[in-house]
Amino acid sequence: MQTYELIAPCHFGLESVVKNEIYDLGYEITEVDDGRVTFEGDTEALVRANLSLRVAERVLLKVGAFHAETFEELFQGTRALPWEDFLPREAKFWVTKASSVKSRLFSPSDIQSVMKKAMVSRMSEHYGLTVFPETGASYPVRVFLKKDEVTVAIDTTGESLHKRGYRKYKVQAPIAENLAAGLIALTPWRPGRMLVDPFCGSGTFLIEAAMISAHIAPGLTRSFTAEAWDNLIPPSMWAEIREELRGEIDLSVPCDLQGYDIDRDAIYAARENARLAGVDGLIHFQVRPVSELSHPRSYGFIITNPPYGERLEKGQDQDLLLLYRTLGERFKALSAWSLYVITSYSDAEKALGLKAQKNRKIYNGMIKTYFYMFPGPKPRVGAARTGNAKV
């Protein structure tokens, strides 16, 4: 089976997590760059990556790369790529996105237009057509320019991988599913450990943790653009790998996952989303203010996305200070727990009354945030790590 280069774009700051995911799938990394990881694999790797990667944004099939400082070089470089190896004559193809960093060519619309013309020129020569019907499967192309180096790839995913399909009920400013999974991976939390989110909103952190615990592949219930590429991937391959991944699901795993929110509608949304994800039996949701945060056991985790400045009305700074102060106080009252907070609130550490061991800059949508890490002590040998206490 032919081997390709596959590219997994991701949130800046989560490249190491995606790299580990790809290694766990059994594939070799060829390059790690800001916001993307490149690896080698065949069409089975393409399918498995789409179905299994929790943190990546999408999976791209690399067509080629070249240097271009002018639009003529961009045209000729694009035209020289073997498009006929990927696109059948009836393919619907276009440049869906162009991004440019520190390059002489920077206009996305001009880059897209020039590349489309070059693709048509190459395809015309190969297929003997001057006009393409574009009635077949979609092959959306993405191009990255960095320091005049052009990387061209076809998007195999379609809608971003963060759209698992379970989040039908939303609340204000929800965290993306793949970002939540990535942040969880940056902590020492592992399946079987206690996890509480006192600002759970639509339940994303806890649902992702439950899916990890139960070995539920995140892409099982959604579709992908490449499922229609029968010129490259046998349709049976998608069905066979889905069936294999379904066989790995284990809903009998012990879990202590708890979500609180003061908003009754948010708790309703979280429960419904968990039901749609198939993990409602693994999570306990409850209407509860952060001031009542407690747990009888030791060595648990809090991973949370509390309100912050961009998500509140003007004039609520004092409320924000009180909210974080309360979270810090309740955390200190817990026995040997760890706290992980994603926020853009600049006074988060001061308000919490805690000094982070470290923090990591993460973009939550267009908002620059920081993931503050307050790890607690490791459990003693023989210490209880799990349970089903609902307090």
Image (spheres, rainbow, N blue to C red):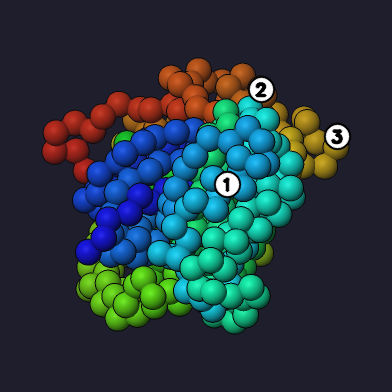
Residue 267 sits in quarter: bottom right
Query: Hey, what amino acid is under mark 3?
Result: Gly
Task: Tell me if mark 1 has few (under 14), some (14-19) or many (20+) residues whose alpha carbon lies within 10 angstroms of its own.
Answer: some
- Residue under label 1, please give it: 76
State the quadrant of the N terminus.
bottom left
Q: Work out whether 266 lies above or below 19.
A: below
Task: Tell me if mark 3 has few (under 14), some (14-19) or many (20+) residues whose alpha carbon lies within 10 angstroms of its own.
Answer: few
- Residue under label 2, please give it: 347
Residue that appears at 68% across and 41% down: 71
Percent x, y of residue 55: 43, 49
Residue 357 visible to the viewer? yes
Residue 21 visible to the viewer? no
Q: Work out whether 255 lies above or below 86.
A: above
Percent x, y of residue 28: 25, 44
Percent x, y of residue 273: 52, 68
Query: Hey, what amino acid is under mark 1?
Result: Gln
Residue that appears at 60% across and 61% down: 121
Distance between the Cα atoms at labels 3 and 1? Answer: 56 Å
Question: Which circle's residue, 3 or 1, is located before the other in the chain?
Answer: 1
Residue that appears at 53% across and 66% down: 125
Question: What secondary structure is marked by label 2?
Answer: loop
Q: Work out whether 89 lies above or below 386.
A: below
Percent x, y of residue 327: 56, 34
- Residue under label 3, please give it: 315
Question: What secondary structure is marked by label 1?
Answer: helix
Distance between the Cα atoms at labels 3 and 2? Answer: 16 Å
| Dot label at residue 168 | none
- Tell me if 143 is positioned left or right of 172 in this view: left
Residue that appears at 58% across and 75% down: 129
Distance between the Cα atoms at labels 1 and 2? Answer: 52 Å
Task: Tell me if mark 2 has few (under 14), some (14-19) or many (20+) residues whose alpha carbon lies within 10 angstroms of its own.
Answer: few
Question: Which circle's residue, 1 or 2, is located before the other in the chain?
Answer: 1
